[in-house]
Image (cartoon, rainbow, N blue to C red):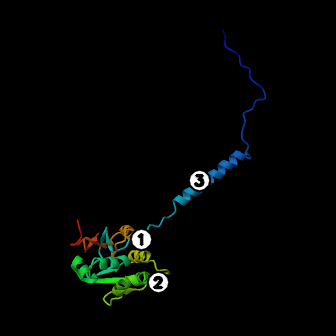
């Protein structure tokens, strides 16, 4: 058996794509989109500014006299547990404390009605520092979180789980809460009353 002979076919030309071919235009458009997306990826991304009060997780702005930002339910739970707010805070922190109440907290207490009259009377105590709110609405949790993000000089006093969870995401802000009929504090570097 011999080798099979191949004859050259005449008029066969190597096929080329013309520059007007639709397939080339699609690939060019795709490459331009790729270049645009790469340019967008290299754009400057602004990271959130970190407070100058923080030394790693340690908040250098905290110091006696402590400013304690009080939530609505903290006042109610203090009444239920028969704890006097100012003296119990001083017992927990071993220092002078200035309880601070925002307008939103007072508005929430007023909305709750006559059942929480005592809590409202305690919140209007002249020893408490009153903080005015500039935003709309009376939702105290958002107000407290925004205030703490702007100024890291507060300790937040709350028994609300959702608010605690939101504040734990903000570095350098201690949380005061009630356990076993006394105030305890978490995330405070020099806290003597905090549980280990």
Indicate left or right for 13 with 156 as reference: right
Q: Quadrant of residue 133?
A: bottom left
Q: Quadrant of residue 6?
A: top right
User: Relative to 160, does residue 100 appear above or below in the rendering?
Assistant: below
**Observer-nearest residue: 157 or 67?**
157
Residue 55: x percent and y percent? 30, 70
Determine the secondary structure under disc 1: loop
What residue does disc 2 label?
Answer: 134
Separation of residues labelled 1 and 3 (CA atoms): 31 Å
Task: Determine which of the numbered discs, if any, sits on residue 62 in the image.
Answer: none
Separation of residues labelled 2 and 3 (CA atoms): 46 Å
The reply to whether residue 61 is in sight is no
**Observer-nearest residue: 20 or 169?**
169
Pair 2/3: label in front: 2
Separation of residues labelled 2 and 1 (CA atoms): 22 Å
Q: Residues within 10 Å of mark 3 (few under 14, many from 20)?
A: few
């Amino acid at each position: 058996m011999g080798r099979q002979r191949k004859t050259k076919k005449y008029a066969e030309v190597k096929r080329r794509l013309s520059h007007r071919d639709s397939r080339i235009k699609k690939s060019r458009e795709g490459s331009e989109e790729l270049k645009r997306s790469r340019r967008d990826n290299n754009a400057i991304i602004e990271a959130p500014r970190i407070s100058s009060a923080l030394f790693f997780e340690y908040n250098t702005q905290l110091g006696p006299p402590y400013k304690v930002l009080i939530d609505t339910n903290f006042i109610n739970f203090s009444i239920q547990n028969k704890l006097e707010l100012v003296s119990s805070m001083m017992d927990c922190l071993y220092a002078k404390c200035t309880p601070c109440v925002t307008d939103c907290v007072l508005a929430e207490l007023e909305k709750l009605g006559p059942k929480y009259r005592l809590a409202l009377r305690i919140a209007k105590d002249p020893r408490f520092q009153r903080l005015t709110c500039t935003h709309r609405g009376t939702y105290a949790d958002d107000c407290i979180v925004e205030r703490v993000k702007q100024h890291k000089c507060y300790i937040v006093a709350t028994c609300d789980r959702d608010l605690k969870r939101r504040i734990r995401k903000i570095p350098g802000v201690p949380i005061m809460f009630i356990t076993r009929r006394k105030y305890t504090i978490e995330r405070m570097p020099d806290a003597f009353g905090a549980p280990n």
